[in-house]
């Protein structure tokens, strides 16, 4: 799965149960900064926490792989341990830097700011997102 170039926001949230429904709360910052507008409809994607996930059960679309398998996936343009020179173009709600590489593939890099040009090493790779740290 590729993430669209029109990605508006990326943040962490907990899925909560309320009155027989489940909901994900949008941080007020997303509305305050004009990233999202109340009353509008948006497409969302749910990604697992890479720090706690080891494997996931099969879904209707098939099996979701763990980090080792995802690193070798033909869908991801990077592998675990690979380094890239990138420019941070956005910040997630938790303050992590976000950049996009080939085909709009998202890489999340903690401890970076918009405009930083850094060399990163991929720590965890999924089909649609990678998590990296700065090496230079």
Image (cartoon, grey):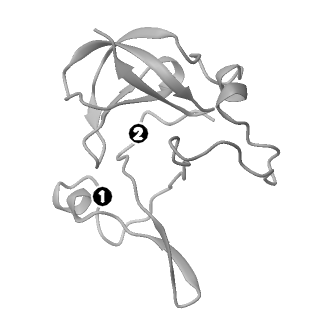
76 in relation to 33, above or below: above
Work out whether residue 44 or residue 62 is closer to the camera in this orientation and state it. Answer: 62
Residue 130 location in percent, x, y? 50, 29
Residue at far bottom of view: 19
Residue 102 location in percent, x, y? 50, 17
Q: Secondary structure at mark 1?
A: loop
**Residue drawn 30% across the image and 58% down it:** 36
In space, the residues marked 1 and 2 are separated at their CA atoms by: 12 Å
The numbered mark, 1 or 2, whose residue comes first in the sequence reads: 2
Q: Locate the C terminus and report the quarter of the image it occupies.
A: top left
Q: Secondary structure at mark 2?
A: loop
60 in relation to 83, above or below: below
Q: Which residue is mark 2?
A: 6
Q: Which residue is mark 1?
A: 36
Q: Is residue 14 left or right of residue 109?
A: right
Work out whether residue 8 or residue 50 is closer to the camera in this orientation and state it. Answer: 50
Residue 109 location in percent, x, y? 35, 28
**Residue drawn 54% across the image and 28% down it:** 124
97 in relation to 76, above or below: below
Crowding around mark 2 (Cα neighbors within 10 Å: few <14, some 14 to 19, many 20+) is few
Find out whether the residues at labels 1 and 2 contact each other: C-beta distance under 8 Å: no
Q: Locate the N terminus and report the quarter of the image it occupies.
A: top right
**Residue drawn 65% across the image and 42% down it:** 54
């Amino acid at each position: 799965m590729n993430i669209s170039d029109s990605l508006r926001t990326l943040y962490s949230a907990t899925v909560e149960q309320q009155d027989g429904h489940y909901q994900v709360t949008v941080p007020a910052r997303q509305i305050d900064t004009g990233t999202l507008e109340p009353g509008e409809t948006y497409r969302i994607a749910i990604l697992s926490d890479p720090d706690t996930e080891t494997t996931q059960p099969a879904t209707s679309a098939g099996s979701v792989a763990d980090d080792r398998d995802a690193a070798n996936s033909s869908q991801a343009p990077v592998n675990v341990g690979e380094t890239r020179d990138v420019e941070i173009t956005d910040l997630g709600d938790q303050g992590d830097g976000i950049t996009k590489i080939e085909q709009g593939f998202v890489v999340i890099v903690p401890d970076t700011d918009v405009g930083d040009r850094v060399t990163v090493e991929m720590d965890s790779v999924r089909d649609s997102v990678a998590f990296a740290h700065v090496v230079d």
